[in-house]
Amino acid sequence: HHVFTVENGQLVPVRYPDPQRLDELPGYEQEREKVIANTRALLEGKPANNVLLYGDAGTGKSSAIKAIANAFADQGLRLVEVKKNQLYQIPDLMDQLAANPLKFILFIDDLSFSSNDDNFAALKAILEGSVGGRARNIAVYATSNRRHLIKETLTDRTGDDIHEADTRQELMSLSFGLTVTFQRPEKARFETILEELAKQHHVDMPMDQLLVKAEAFAIRAGGRSPRVAKQFIEQCESGVQK
C-alpha cells in the first residue's frame, strides 16, 4: 500500500486509491514541476519544503498531489491523508514515521480555519517540528481553496475583500516553505486543456465546435476550470454532449 488515512492516531491503508496520473492532468505542468522537484528532494534525503497549493476550486491541486504520490510510490513515497480535525493526533504519528526508512507526505486537503480555531495552532506546531527539528523523511502538502478559506475565516468580519490579504498572510505565516498558486485558467489555457483531454478520451469532434460548446458549458458551470473541462469531455465521450 502507498496511500493511507489516519484512524485513532494509526495508519490505515487505502485499498483502492485514486489512480490519478500526471499525464492525465494537462495545463498546469509548470506549477506541478515545483512540487515534483520538492518531492524528489524529499526522496533523495535533501532538505524538502512543506508545500501549500493555493488557489481556485477545480484547478487540480488535490489531483496533482495524488498523481505525484502515485508516480513516486515505487521509489518509497507514501501518502498519508490527514483530516483537519485529526491534526492533534499527528505529532505522535510523526515520531513513529521519523524512524521509518520510507518517505511520507502528510496530505491535508481543503485547508481552512474559522476564527479562534485550535487546529491552526496544531498545524503550526506540526509544520515547525519539535524541539529536535522536523523529520527529514516527512513533508506536509496542503491545499486551500481561496474562496473556502475566506468564507470560513471572515464570517464574523465585515468587508471580506479588504481583509483577504490579511487572511492570506495568516495562512502563509504557517511554515510552508513553498507556496504554489493554481489560478483559474484563462481562455488559451482552457483550450489547451480541452484539446489534450479530447485526445485522451478519443473525442472526435471538430475543434472549433468543441471549444464553442465547452465555453457555453463552462459559463453554465460557473466558470472555466480543469474540472469543468474534464466534465465536459466526459459528457462528450458518453454521448450526452453532441
Image: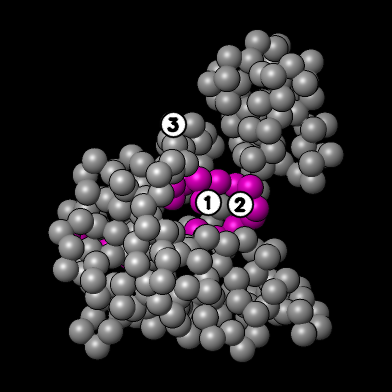
Asked if the residue under mark 3 is in contact with the one under mark 1, i.e. CB atoms within 8 Å, the reply is no
The residue beneath circle 3 is: 23
Q: Is residue 60 magenta?
A: yes
Q: Position of residue 142 (x, y in %)?
A: 47, 63
Q: Which mark is residue 183?
A: 2
Q: In screen coordinates, is 62 left or right of 72?
A: right
Of marks 1 and 3, which one's residue comes earlier in the chain? 3
Q: Which mark is residue 61?
A: 1
How crowded pointer 3 is (Cα within 10 Å; few <14, some 14-19, many 20+) is rated as: few
Q: Which mark is residue 115?
A: none
Q: Amino acid at mark 1?
A: Lys
For marks 1 and 3, give the CA distance.
15 Å
**141 or 3, which lies in front?**
3
Q: Residue at x 52, y 71 (%)?
A: 84
Of marks 2 and 1, which one's residue comes earlier in the chain? 1
Q: Amino acid at mark 2?
A: Gln
Looking at the rendered structure, the secondary structure element under dot 2 is loop
Q: Position of residue 176 (x, y in %)?
A: 41, 70
Quarter holding the C terminus is top right
Asked if the residue under mark 1 is in contact with the one under mark 2, i.e. CB atoms within 8 Å, the reply is no
Q: Quadrant of residue 72?
A: top left
**80 or 13, which lies in front?**
13
Q: Position of residue 191 (x, y in %)?
A: 65, 30
